[in-house]
Image (spheres, rainbow, N blue to C red):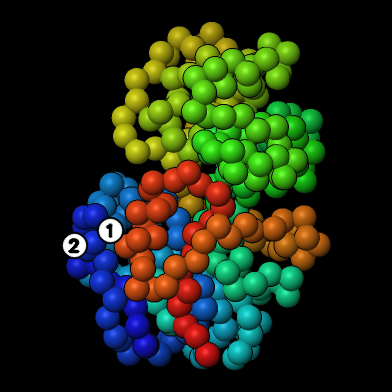
Amino acid sequence: MKRVRIYQTGGPEVMRVEPFEPPQPGPGEALLRIRSAGINPVDTYLRAGLQGYTPKLPYTPGMDGAGEILASGNGVSGFKTGQRVYCAGSISGTYAEAALCRADQLHPLPGKLSFEQGACIGVPYGTAYRALFRVAEAQKGEMVLVHGASGGVGLAAAQLARAAGLTVIGTAGSETGRKLVAAQGAVPLNHGDPGHFEQALKATGGRGVPIILEMLADKNLGEDLKILAPEGRVVVIGSRGEVTITPRELMARDSSIRGMSLLRVPPEELRQIHAALGKGFSDGTLQPVVAQSFRLEEAAQAHRQALAGPARGNLVLACANG
């Protein structure tokens, strides 16, 4: 079997494909045949050494994937060999034809979803759900502005928010992306237009935006604070650098900036999140959007695409065949 391996942090070129012998699952673990692996922005930050910590080198990247269970260790219940599953997290990394996972990282893959779609659940939908309902504490009837709404997390957030009875404004950088945002029931705005902040404020009748989900805080946070509603919340999901803000914008509105990362979420909370998500995938309310699939050997190209944008859904790697 093959896997992607990183021996030093750096650009996409540090990823190499090499053969490996899959490990045997220990107690509470399962070995998955990975049919498709999800590519997330956090994968690129970890590879480049920009996430604040670096996995022990060498390592195989990837947190999300979908496929079938090849083998299970002692103490694994509720799953059987050959069962279709998706993983939200992995012990050994999902950019591989097989990956080792803890049982609590596994979830049944609904029959309506393909392996490619299953690979787009863990980080995108887990992040969006937690940002909206645990961190921002969104309530039915509120309005949410999603910056970068045509990306994996953004689309998930738009779908989840609409299903929960929120009004959604979503920004995207391309016409194709804005059409995709509109297809989720959101009001699309062009985030390449400096006037889009004022347009978002106008959509609230001048009252301000109660919730902003921010995928690129280093570019937008200063302007976000100017259009917040009183007691509004900005949830920082992504940032690629430093940013200067004016604290009085927060003080004047009694508003707040809240950061979040799935990497700090305890397993029990993740289990609850994915139990809630499962209902939406089964009834078709939630539909992961796959923009492009790459071969395992094209992982570097996929990372370049993830950083270049513009986003139009999720990127995945096609891993094991047959």
* Viewer can see residue 157: no
Say which residue appears at 23% left-offset and 61% top-offset: 13
In the rendering, at what x and y percent does residue 256 appear? 52, 24
Label 2 secondary element: loop
In the rendering, at what x and y percent does residue 108 appear? 66, 74
Q: Residues within 10 Å of mark 2 (few under 14, many from 20)?
A: some
Label 1 secondary element: helix
Count of residue discs: 2
Specify the label residue 12 is tagged with. Answer: 1
Q: Residues within 10 Å of mark 1 (few under 14, many from 20)?
A: some
Specify the label residue 225 is tagged with. Answer: none
In the rendering, at what x and y percent does residue 300 appear? 32, 62
Kind of residue indicated by mark 1: Pro
The quarter in which the N terminus is drawn is: bottom left
Give the number of the mark in front: 2 or 1: 1
Q: In this view, does 306 lie to the left or right of 55?
A: right
In the rendering, at what x and y percent does residue 71 appear? 51, 91
Establish if 267 lies above or below 249. below
Establish if 9 lies above or below 76. above
Q: In which quarter of the image is residue 22?
A: bottom left
Kind of residue indicated by mark 2: Gln
Say which residue appears at 45% left-offset and 56% top-offset: 40
Mark 2 → mark 1, Cα distance in angstroms? 11 Å
Establish if 184 lies above or below 97. above
Q: In which quarter of the image is residue 186?
A: top right
Which residue is nearer to you in this view: 156 or 126?
156
Say which residue appears at 32% left-offset and 90% top-offset: 21
Which residue is nearer to you in this view: 263 or 121?
121
Q: In this view, does 10 lie to the left or right of 155?
A: left
Specify the label residue 8 is tagged with. Answer: 2
